[in-house]
Every structure is written in C-alpha cells, then in structure tokens.
Image (tube, rainbow, N blue to C red):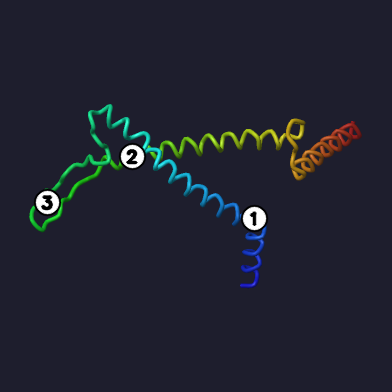
Amino acid sequence: MRNFIQEFKDFAIKGNMMDMAIGIIIGTAFNNVVSVLVKKVIMPPLSLMTEDVHLADKKYILREAVGNVTEVAIGYGELIEVIVDFAIISFTIFAVIKFMNRFRTKAEDPANKEEKTPKNIELLANLEKLMKEQNEILRNNKQ
C-alpha cells in the first residue's frame, strides 16, 4: 500500500495530473465554444438556406402524443448538430496535435539547431555517437 501511495505522489508531483486536469478544463471550455458556434452561428444561416428548416427540430415520429401518452420520436436533427460539433472538434484537435508534433520532431532532432533539444535527447544522441565511434575503433583493431 505504501508503494502505491508513493507511486501516486510521484505521478502527481511530476505534473502529469496537473497537465491532465488543465487539458480536461480547456477541452470542456472548448467544447462549449464549439457547441455555441454550431448552434448560434453555423445552423441559423443553414436554416435560412433550407427555407427556415431548423435541423434541431427535425425528428422521425414513431408514436404521436395522444392524451396522456407522450410522443416517441427519433431526433435526427440534434444528431446532425452533434456530428457537426464532433467534426469541428476532431479537426481542431488533429490540427493542434499535428502542429505540436512538428515542433516536437524538430526539438528531438539533435542535428537541428533551430530548436533547443531537450537535455535527455542530447545525452542519448551523444551516447549513440560515442557508441558508433567505439564500434568503429573495435572494427579497425580486429582487422
């Protein structure tokens, strides 16, 4: 149990938990922004172009409401709005990750002097270079 608690402390202290929490908060806020963007900016002009058809109100009625019996319907219009939300969010996340990966690749290349290479990558690159030199010396000594 003590080992588990120590592992959790290491995880929390290293910043992984904080990074994850910040990502979740930003993601939630971004989701709200995109949702409003779709509902209040994209869908109204689309509604005008389709002769005032509001997609959110579109549904396929399975059973009409009669008396105390409630209506049963499949709301496919809301599904279309959610799909548009998803498409915007997924494209944005794809673009951000692609942008971040470009910088990560540059930073992890020790030969690239544009970006500062992290110390651990530099050390590994130096070790690799030294091992290649050592192997070359050993090959030359055997001949």
Labels 2, 1: front one? 2
What is the spatial separation of the Cα atoms under label 2 and label 1, in whole angstroms? 36 Å
Q: Nearer the viewer, mark 1 or mark 3?
A: 3
Q: Which residue is mark 2?
A: 81
Q: Residue at x 16, y 44 (%)?
A: 61
Which residue is at a point 63% across and 60% down the rendered structure image? 12
- Picture coordinates of residue 119 (x, y %)? 77, 44
Which label is found at residue 65? 3
Query: Gap in Å between the C-alphas at discs 1 and 3?
Result: 54 Å
Marks 2/3: CA–CA distance = 25 Å
Percent x, y for residue 92? 49, 36
**Which structural element holds mark 3?**
loop
Q: Mark 3 belongs to which amino acid?
A: Ala
Residue 111 against residue 11 in the figure, above or below: above
Q: On the rendered structure, is 114 left or right of 26?
A: right
The residue under the point 47% across, 35% down is 91
Q: Position of residue 55 (x, y in %)?
A: 27, 37
Say which element carries label 1. Answer: loop
Q: Along the polypeptide, which appears first: circle 2 or circle 1?
A: 1
Q: Are marks 2 and 1 in contact (CB under 8 Å)?
A: no
Residue extending furthest toward the bottom: 1
Q: Earlier in the sequence, mark 2 or mark 3?
A: 3
* Mark 1 vs 3, N-terminal side: 1
Q: Is residue 109 left or right of residue 61?
A: right
Q: Which residue is mark 1?
A: 15
Q: Quadrant of residue 106?
A: top right
- Label 1 is placed on what type of residue? Gly
Q: Are marks 1 and 3 in contact (CB under 8 Å)?
A: no
